[in-house]
Amino acid sequence: MSDIERTLSIIKPDAVERNLFEKISDILKKNNLKIEKNKKLQISKEEAAEFYKEHQSKPFYERLCNYLSSGPIVVMELSGENAISKYRDIMGATDPKKAENNTIRQLYGISIDKNSVHGSDSKSSAKRELEFFFNN
Ligand code: CMP
């Protein structure tokens, strides 16, 4: 069943630093995901901690928050048919070493921390994450 959805994508500091915005947006466009909104910003460690609060019990939480706040990121609101699961497929597995060929993380990810991109994992997290960055 097709469903037009919106989802949040983050281009993480490692990928912004390597100027990968154009390459990643080409992949999105080829897969019929439209960039409705985008902005470049740097968030504080406290904001990163709030954004990733579902991971607060995980051993990597501190590292994750330090990393997301370590440099500029690009956040995007994407729309398209089944955008949430489609974007997760296009990103590939969290660990770039396990990601399928030609996914964003396989092509550009450096490590499980510096894995270049984030994407919402469900309708409820897409809603929360879009509100977090775009107040919509
Ligand atoms: P992301 O999709 O942004 O969601 C949480 C992030 O935590 C994940 O990508 C990884 O970059 C990072 N992370 C670090 N270690 C792990 C781990 N062992 N399992 C899952 N995510 C991890």
Image: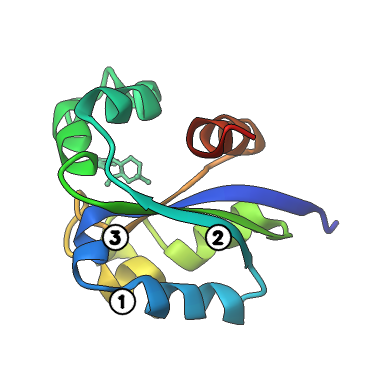
From the viewer's perspective, is residue 40 above or below residue 51? below
Inspect the image, locate mark 3, and give the three-letter code of the amino acid beneath it.
Ser
| Mark 3 in CB contact with mark 2 (< 8 angstroms) | no
Q: What separation in Å lies between label 3 and label 1 (alpha carbons)? A: 10 Å
Q: In the image, what residue occupies the spot 14% across and 34% down?
A: 63
- Of pointers 3 and 1, the one earlier in the residue sequence: 1
Q: Position of residue 89 (x, y in %)?
A: 52, 63
Q: Position of residue 8 (x, y in %)?
A: 53, 47
Dot 3 corresponds to which residue? 116
- Of pointers 2 and 1, the one earlier in the residue sequence: 2
For mark 3, give the secondary structure: loop
Inspect the image, locate mark 2, and give the three-letter code of the amino acid beneath it.
Tyr
Mark 2 vs ligand 1: CB below 8 Å? no
Q: Indicate the quadrant of ligand 1 in the picture.
A: top left
Can you say which quadrant of the picture contains the N terminus?
Answer: bottom right
Dot 1 corresponds to which residue? 107
Q: What separation in Å lies between label 3 and label 2 (alpha carbons)? A: 14 Å
Picture colour scheme: rainbow
Q: In the image, what residue occupies the spot 55% across and 39% down?
A: 134
Res. 3 mark: none
